[in-house]
Image (cartoon, grey):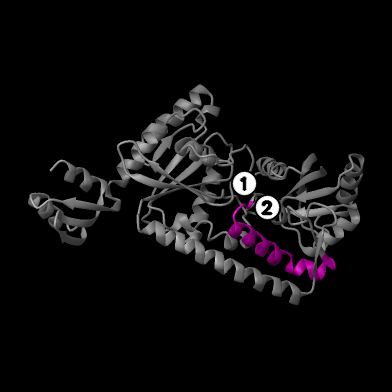
Amino acid sequence: MTRAWVLHPDIKTDNNRRIAEPALAEAVALAEALPQLEVVGQEVVILRTVNAGMLFGSGKIEELKQRMEAVEVELVLVDGHVTPVQQRNLEKAWGVKLLDRTGLILEIFSDRAATREGVLQVEMAALNYQRTRLVRAWTHLERQRGGLGFVGGPGETQIESDRRAIDEQLVRLRRQLDKVVKTRALHRAARAKVPFPIVALVGYTNAGKSTLFNRLTGADVMAKDMLFATLDPTMRSLVLPDGPEIILSDTVGFISDLPTELVAAFRATLEEVLAADIICHVRDISHAETEEQAQNVRDILTSLGVPKDTRSFEIWNKIDLLSPDRADAVRARAARDENVLAISSLTGEGLDELQATIAKALQGAVREADLVLSFADGKKRAWLFAQEVVLHEEQTEDGFHLTVRWSAQQEDQFQRL
């Protein structure tokens, strides 16, 4: 275990800064998402101004050094951006490794990525992040099996730090990623032939998306009380009660100040959201910053280019963690808005209503089906053509073979003819 100390710089000149205590708590949760780290200290450091070369003032650096030496800290995690020069100077002053917020999130992504695409995207994001740091801060990047090597000690593979070597590595990764993306495109094309509606679960990390996904589909997706438990997109078919069959997609959790390297790298991971018929925005309604988290998710969805006319619902999750009075108030608020549902993915409360709401919203969604009508079914055949749902028809000895593209509502009407 690597002994880590978490620092959240509260920069008073930053008008967009977050509330310090919840931000520190999230940074600690990020650190605890890596099993090889043990958080032995945490604190908010108030900064009137930022020291260009050291980030913190000399007095604070010395004070922190003494406290960290007392508990034998090996890694310092700074919840914010640290320049290569600041990183090098602080590592020298404290005699420890240092990781900023972007580096830590990259390390978590490396630890979690399971698909080939996810692994390649993390490696590319890590190389882009380290590109200037390799040149300015040290002469080689140590990599360790099972991670990016930011946290551990000397690894088994060294990557030469000159730009040419890194660029060659990036070119190689891009070629591999292109092949993987083409394979995913083939899979999407195959799914499109049976165009079940896609319902995407999105939300701030640790909002309970994977627990909800598992509860609805019976899948066994990693669902733990930690940030970024799910990274790679997971999809399962689900037949809604009295409704259509859908494809439910669980996605990577969003987080405030998501590094731009990762927004770009994981755009393909979020492509199912762009194609979704319905987006379910899962919120941890018990969290102190639930409103800020929700706005962060909305901002990222907008930046990804999600169509404005995509139907969406807010799923207020974890009402089981609220006091009885507050839970009742949340249920009452949700009841007044047709686009909001209050649920507990842990206890199952509200899940029947959630599925019924999705089914109702998808009444206009269409899928393909093959039908065989006898020559005596002229009325049914005429109805199908009147509805303009027939894609293809072939007449054989036993009747008409038709391929239709219709909604669940049209299918129900046809069955009653």
Pick whichever, 387 or 32, lies toward us.
387
**Which of the 4 quarters of the picture holds residue 122?**
bottom right
**To which quarter of the image does residue 98 belong?**
bottom right
What is the C-alpha distance between the residues marked 2 and 1?
A: 9 Å
Q: Which residue is under mark 1? A: 228
Question: What SS does tag 2 mark?
Answer: helix
Residue identifier under label 2: 105
Placement of the N terminus among the 4 image quadrants:
top right
Is residue 138 in the magenta section?
yes
Nearest the viewer among 162 and 368 is: 368
Q: Residue at x 53, y 41 (%)?
A: 210
Give the amino acid at mark 1. Answer: Phe
- Highlighted range, magenta: 113-140
Q: Which mark is residue 118?
A: none
Q: Are marks 2 and 1 in contact (CB under 8 Å)?
A: yes
Kind of residue at disc 2: Ile
Check the picture and name the quadrant holding the C terminus. top left
- Residue 73 lies in the magenta-colored region: no
Where 79 sits versus 266, above or below? above
> How many neighbours does mark 2 have within 10 angstroms: few (below 14), some (14-19), or many (20 or more)?
many
